[in-house]
Image (spheres, helix red, strand yellow):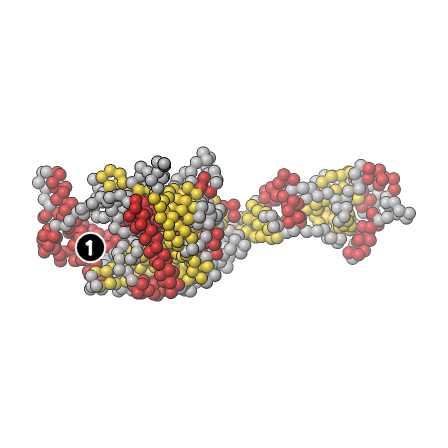
Amino acid sequence: MTMFDVKSVSVEVGGAEISFETGKLARQASGAVVVRSGDTMVLCTATMGNLRDVDFLPLTVDVEERHYAVGRIPGSYFRREARAGEKATLTARMIDRPLRPLFPKGWHYETQLVSTPLSVDHVHPYDILAMNGASAALAISPVPVAEHVGAVRVGKLDGDFVVNPSEEEHENLEMDLIVSGSKDAILMVECGADNVTEAEVLDALDIAHAEIKKLVGAMEELAGIAGKEKISVEAPALDEALVEQIRGSHANAIDEATSVPEKLARQEAIEAIKDAVLAQYAPETGDEEADAARRDEVSRAFGSIEKTTIRRRIAIDKKRPDGRAQDEIRPIETEVDISPRVHGSALFTRGETQILSNVALGTTRMDMRLDNLGLQETKTFFHHYNFPPYSVGEAGFMRGPKRRDIGHGALAERALAPTMPSVEDFPYVTRVVSETLESNGSSSMGSVCASSMALQAAGVPVSSPVAGVAMGLIKEDDHVIVLTDIAGVEDHLGDMDFKVAGTEEGINALQMDIKITGVTFDILREALEQARQGRLFILGKMSEAIDGPREQLSPTAPRIESIKIDPEKIGAVIGKGGETIRGLSEEFEAQIDVEDDGTIRVYAANGELVEACIAQIEAMTREAEVGDTFKGKVVKTTTFGAFVELVKGTDGLLHISAVKPGERVEAVEDVLSQGDELDVTVVEVDRERGRIGLRRSDDPAIAGKSKEELAAVGSGDRGPRRGGGDRGGRGRDRDRRRGGDRERRRRD
């Protein structure tokens, strides 16, 4: 006998089983489901709270990543998860966007959806499970959503479509398409790709919807065996008589106000008409509660007329609020080099939307560390998006990026990432920041355009320029119109927001939110083709400001060069306790990164310092050969000669007999002191014994001699005596007992 009443269903999607279980965990939530595939488990809860006196949907969606799910302890100071990371935020947005429109009008109960990954196996990504689990939790809760929503990922791998590819396969995907939908329609799409065609996107959507139907069927089955009774909600009804009264008295004024092309002027005109309507139909009576209710009723009636007027004018009369044609893009101005000390900057203005993008280049130590549950640990390219309140003429709090800002930044990053060079070809970390200076719709796509130009201005060798355009759709009765480059009012009152970004060759990123059913594949095909034409037009405008990456980086950008050495020489570069590499860094004001395969990257403020540092490293790591000359420094004197540092970490011996050419000296110190610099030539290299013999470069005995002749000189210094022993007499034997036999020291 168990205390749990467990109910479960399962479905096969993409060759893997996904199970939904309820009745065991989190039983006090309004609905709780554990979704599992492989060893990845996500607990999803839907909880209904108190009824609130608000005029909006009080819905919150959270994804709570827990590091224990992958057997790790958080890296923060307190070893506890902090605020949600980018992955969790983006997943929460993908849960929220398709579900929010499905809540009934008038639903004012506090509602919270929480998804917590309990176990992640790095094969089955948790995001898709969380998206399905949130809808399943709603399905068995008392919350009366209109539809169940399933979600799948479709990847393109080696030319083939794969449903729910493994996490390890993500790195090699040519397209990563996440789709949410009901059994009848697609509701949301998120896509990152590398120049895929419009036809491939449509094929992937078709595959995705077939799998979504299976998931929705499983949710319906679960709701049938474990669902709670739904709460009925009566949507606030419009007073149709009042609507007709307002239309009769103010229809012409509303029509004129909503036709004003400029955004702020249009808003002011509409507000003026609304104030007049309120004054006429909701005069103050002294009863505050009754007056507030009447003002709300009149405001809703006025809003309905405003919305219908704009939508019908666009869909039926083919007249947009700013006077543009269906496929017309607003006037575009492009400019680069706006910010003089920035490594690359660009300004993109499209109508009343204006974006300033700035590029900063840094060393690989500035990469972004991803403290999340995925396999990817770092990023060397990232894009951030800011949307200050002044961009829409408002005053407001500025307390860090909102979820929308993070989502828009990630969308533009997905669009730009396929064009970025590899770290091997361009060993920089690249950060792009897009500042929204003005906004009247499509600011995320404006940030794609501005960022692409800024990267080119910075000299980043991107493979292609990237542009983006936001598409919209309005469906009134049997009238359907697809709009190119939607403005804010068209986004707000429209039925679809469809953002497409890419190059001349194909699509790199796509985001779609559909608020209605009945959007057919023919309509999507039309929207994608219209977006392609718009994208090509915008790319042409961008090329007027800059038509490709600059050959040189900005003078203010750090310089980076890389070389590859024998991995066995890494110790010589690093030195004992890091002494050598620290000395190089201080001498050349450089950052030096050494990898296990022998790759060395040098970063400095200018090219001269980089080249000088690399030359020093090359000298340190190259094998000295007979005939090589060095500007050396005396590092130690002994009774038998002077040790001369040729390069950091490598010394040679200048024998006492050669300290002063042509003259006999009693003590090395009579001629040389520690720290003296002199030109020396290698005359002997004994690799087996690790020693290098030197002569002064101005020694007449070696002047004009070939390498072979120099080697003979060196062997003469150290050559074998007749009968076997070492040449050099008793002094040499005595010195050897003191360790003088070692003519070369490598100082690690």
> Which residue lies under the disc numbered 1?
307
- Image location of residue 563, percent across then percent down: 60, 53
Instruction: Specify the quadrant of the image occupied by residue 495.
Output: bottom left
Q: How crowded is mark 1: few (under 14 residues within 10 Å), some or many (20 or more)?
A: some
Residue at the location (48% across, 50% down)?
380
Q: Which of 507 and 201 is in front in this view?
A: 201
In the rendered image, the quadrant that contains the N terminus is top left
Extreme-right residue of the structure:
723
Residue 575 or 372: which is nearer the viewer? 372
Quadrant in the picture for residue 520: bottom left
Along the line of sight, which residue is nearer the eye, 389 or 661?
Answer: 389
Residue farthest along the top direction in this orientation = 78
Camera-nearest residue between 506 and 131: 131
Residue 350: x and y in percent read 32, 58
The structure residue drawn at horizontal position 43% and vertical position 58%, both measured from the top left corner, is 162
Tell me if I can see residue 275 in this picture. Answer: no
Under mark 1, the amino acid is Lys
